[in-house]
Image (cartoon, rainbow, N blue to C red):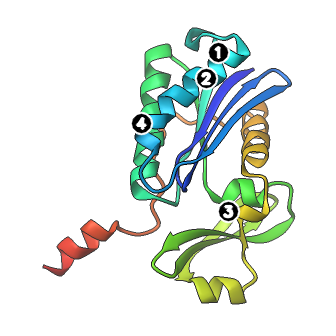
Amino acid sequence: MNCLAVDTTSSKLIVILIKGDETIEHVREVGRSGHSSLLMPAVQAVLAEAGLAVSELDSVAVVVGPGSFTGIRIGVAAMTALSFAENLKRISVTSFEPIAYDKQKTLAAVDAGHGNAYVARCENGKVVETLFVTSAEAEGMKAEYCPKCDAADALAAVVRQKAENGEFVSVLEPFYMRKSQAEREKDEI
């Protein structure tokens, strides 16, 4: 299996190339607005390090959210374009799955900004319920955020498992748990 996986939903840019049993990672702190200019150079770097051309990929994977609205769109759009251009299989991963990977039961949390959090009750690595709560409520629930896990390794493990199980999707769809700030402000007008 040769699979390119990306996560652009947080302040980190994660690009992973899974080549058989080997994993090549590019992880970089990019802040709130660096994903669009750095994603494709990072993709080129991991492909070059692996000695692979885009045409040698079998699939792409992308973290579809929740997280940064713009980051979600950048990752989903880039992997959708690549998958259509090269006729690649597609794997969709939520932001919660790497946190919940290999755990029987957990509460996975993702920072939603403005003192809020996206939380998911997960069983056996799968999301069973989602909540939008304050960060204080998430802390009180003892929800686990990804900085406590190795995000790149966990993402690679989830992607490998989904590929082995044949969990491919026909369309990579963003997973938004609420409207963006611009949409909420528009609704108030």
Q: Which residue is mark 3?
A: 127
Pointers 3 and 4 in contact (CB under 8 A)? no
Q: Quadrant of the C terminus?
A: bottom left
> The residue under label 3 is which amino acid type?
Val
**Is residue 13 toward the left or the right of residue 75 in the image?**
right
Say if residue 155 shows up in the picture: yes
Task: Specify the farthest residue to the left.
Answer: 189
Q: Position of residue 162 (x, y in %)?
A: 73, 39
How far apart are the alpha carbons under marks 2 and 1?
5 Å
> The residue under label 4 is which amino acid type?
Ser
Question: Which of pointers 3 and 2 lies earlier in the amino acid sequence?
Answer: 2
Q: Which residue is mark 1?
A: 48
Pointers 4 and 1 in contact (CB under 8 A)? no
Pointers 3 and 1 in contact (CB under 8 A)? no
* Quarter location, residue 138: bottom right
Question: Which of pointers 3 and 4 lies earlier in the amino acid sequence?
Answer: 4
Q: Which residue is mark 2?
A: 45
Q: Position of residue 153 (x, y in %)?
A: 79, 44
Secondary-structure class at tag 2 = helix
Question: Which of pointers 2 and 4 lies earlier in the amino acid sequence?
Answer: 4
Residue shown at 75% from the left, 39% from the top:
156
How far apart are the alpha carbons under marks 3 and 4?
31 Å
* 50 or 177: nearer the viewer: 50
Q: Which residue is mark 4?
A: 37
Question: How many neighbours does mark 3 have within 10 angstroms: few (below 14), some (14-19), or many (20 or more)?
Answer: some
Pointers 2 and 1 in contact (CB under 8 A)? yes
* 1 or 19: nearer the viewer: 19
Question: Which of pointers 4 and 1 lies earlier in the amino acid sequence?
Answer: 4
Pointers 3 and 2 in contact (CB under 8 A)? no
Secondary-structure class at tag 1 = helix
**Is residue 174 toward the left or the right of residue 62 in the image?**
left
